[in-house]
Image (spheres, rainbow, N blue to C red):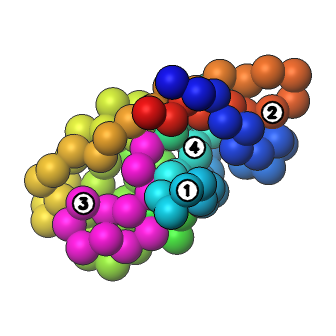
Amino acid sequence: MPWIRACEADDIDAEDVIRFDYNDHTYALYRSPDDQYFATDGLCTHENVHLCDGLVMDNIIECPKHNGRFDYTTGAARGAPACIALKTYNVKVEGNFVMIEID
């Protein structure tokens, strides 16, 4: 599976999320409070709303539309109305670039 350069590491603030689009697919890239990087599908599994507009708290992303919650480190749904997990992707940092492994 190819590794794709998604952004610069400094483009994501600690405890925040940004949107990344590649080949007609939207991803969400996260930076944890301890400077680890994560990636999930970028749309909520409940109603396809962009998660990049949501609120990040610790390792949780909250959807901006109906407040469904997901653990962005595992993709697990953690709060109604979201009940289907997000797909997660491997992430690594090379130099100052955040790379995502896309299948």
Q: Is residue 37 visible?
A: no
Q: Nearer the viewer, mark 4 or mark 1?
A: 1
Mark 1 or mark 2, which has the lower sequence index? 1
Helix, strand or loop status at disc 1: loop
Mark 4 or mark 1, which has the lower sequence index? 1
Q: Is residue 99 visible?
A: yes
Residue corresponding to mark 3: 45
Mark 2 or mark 4, which has the lower sequence index? 4
Residue beneath the point at 65% across and 22% down: 92
Residue corresponding to mark 2: 97
What amino acid is at disc 2?
Phe
Residue corresponding to mark 1: 23
Helix, strand or loop status at disc 2: strand
Range of residues picked out in magenta: 40-50
Residue 7: percent from left, percent from top:
76, 45
- Compared with 83, 15 (above or below) is above
Mark 3 or mark 4, which has the lower sequence index? 4
Give the alpha-carbon distance from disc 2 to disc 3, as whole Å. 28 Å
What amino acid is at disc 1?
Asn
Q: Looking at the image, which is closer to me, 8 or 103?
A: 103
Residue 46: percent from left, percent from top:
20, 66
Residue beneath the point at 38% across and 62% down: 43
What amino acid is at disc 4?
Tyr
Residue beneath the point at 29% across and 46% down: 86
Residue corresponding to mark 4: 30
Picture quadrant of residue 82 = bottom left
